[in-house]
Amino acid sequence: MAAVIARAVDDRETVAVGTLSPIPAAGVLLARSRHAPRARVIIINHEDCWPFHNGSKEFYDFAQRRKIDLFFLSGGQIDQFGNLNLITIGEHDHPKVRLPGGAGSAMLYYLAGRVMLFRADHTPRTFVERVDCVTSPGTSPPRVLRPGGPWKVVTPLAVFAFNRERGRLELESVHPGVSVAEVQSSTGFPLRSPGHVPTTSPPDEQDLAILRGPVRESVATLYPIFARTAFLAA
Amino acid sequence: MPGHVGSDYETLRPDFKVITDPYSGKDVLLVPAITPDVSVIHALQADAAGNLILDEKEDDFLLAQASRAVVASAEEIVDADTLRRAPYGVRLSEIYVTALVPAPGGAHPTACRGRYGIDDAHITEYLRLAGSDDTFRDYLRCYVFDLKDHGAYLAEVGLGALAA
């Protein structure tokens, strides 16, 4: 997943990573070590990657000036229309699960140029036909100021691309060793794809060495448990 | 507030209003300002007048501006001249500050820049005991009611060296 995220980063662009996002943090740091050395990398509250001096307010103000090209979001539920749910699962007034809340997602999903969604699991419970509560919609009518929106989704099984014209997620690739049928059985909506579904290219040896070495060390300052448990030895 | 238009916030929060922005002609969501009665913030340093140096990563300045009253605790009280020369931090004038409490270790079990890190074992214990009213009473007994003062708390959580 981190390698897929790394490839999404273009050199010289501004890429930002918010809270509770260790995999995107690892991915953008990998990108900067490889093909995107001049990318401006912002990782919330990271000692070396946080250029702001006035809290998250300054970060949100920066985003509202449309200065973020690529951002990462997740959802307790994500549906085929790219809608995100970070509020409640089940009936809103008697929820089965109360999620942490939208925070800045309903602003960043509109104003960051490209938003890559990620989930560390891929189940029919999280990838649903329609979310129970729309914290942030995948698309908006022209009357709404919305320069940005969903672009891709990465999970442990596959990559989806968001088709803006159709307003739908489409299967872009399946990871090595994963079949389309397996992705379908783990997804709560019927998969659409433009035709033959290729295999995601895996990280190369150098990617793995960088991830397990300097990237692991750098994310450990923010995500000590992730750094201890998510990597194989260097 | 940019974004948000077309989400379920519109129905969940009737106090949020969609209007047409007179400048761009686009729909935008208006959100009423939050005005807390009291905010409680923790400063890295303070002087006796209540001028503060706040962590740059926090939104305490915004919180203080929004609130009717501000109670600040401070890691350290220094003289006004030392505060003026502080190399790091957001400055908050004493005009916002209602009350100041000297409290070394006051951010525990969260971290305080340059002084102590996050106490993840304590937070894990807190989360476990906060799961029910009964066990939360145990937490309060152990860390609040049975300790005679703040110095005793710091000693209990392993930050005794910070006590004056």
Image (tube, rainbow, N blue to C red):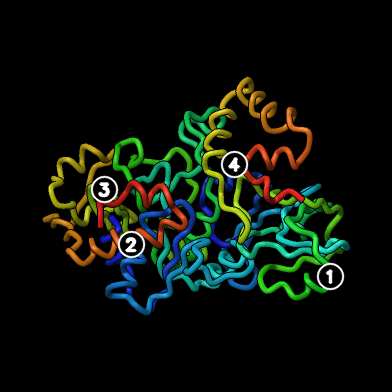
Residue B89 at what x, y percent from top left?
A: 67, 68
Q: Which residue is mark 2?
A: A27
Hey, what amino acid is under mark 4?
Answer: Leu
* Chain designation of label 3: A
Residue A231 at what x, y percent from top left?
A: 29, 52
Hey, what amino acid is under mark 2?
Answer: Gly
Q: Which residue is mark 4?
A: B12
Secondary structure, mark 2, is helix
- Work out whether B135 lies above or below A223: above
Secondary structure, mark 3, is loop
**Camera-nearest label, 4 or 2:** 2
Foreground residue among B16 and A155: A155
Secondary structure, mark 1, is helix
- Work out whether A55 lies above or below B106: below
* Chain designation of label 1: B
2 or 3: tag closer to the N-terminus: 2
Using the numbered discs, state the Cα–Cα distance from disc 4 to disc 2 in whole angstroms.
Answer: 35 Å
Residue density around tag 4, few if under 14, some if 14–19, many if 20 or more, within 10 Å: few
* Total numbered labels placed on residues in the image: 4
Secondary structure, mark 4, is helix
**Camera-nearest label, 4 or 1:** 1
Discs 2 and 1 lie in a common subunit:
no
Q: Which residue is mark 1?
A: B80
Residue density around tag 3, few if under 14, some if 14–19, many if 20 or more, within 10 Å: some
Residue A80 at what x, y percent from top left?
A: 33, 47
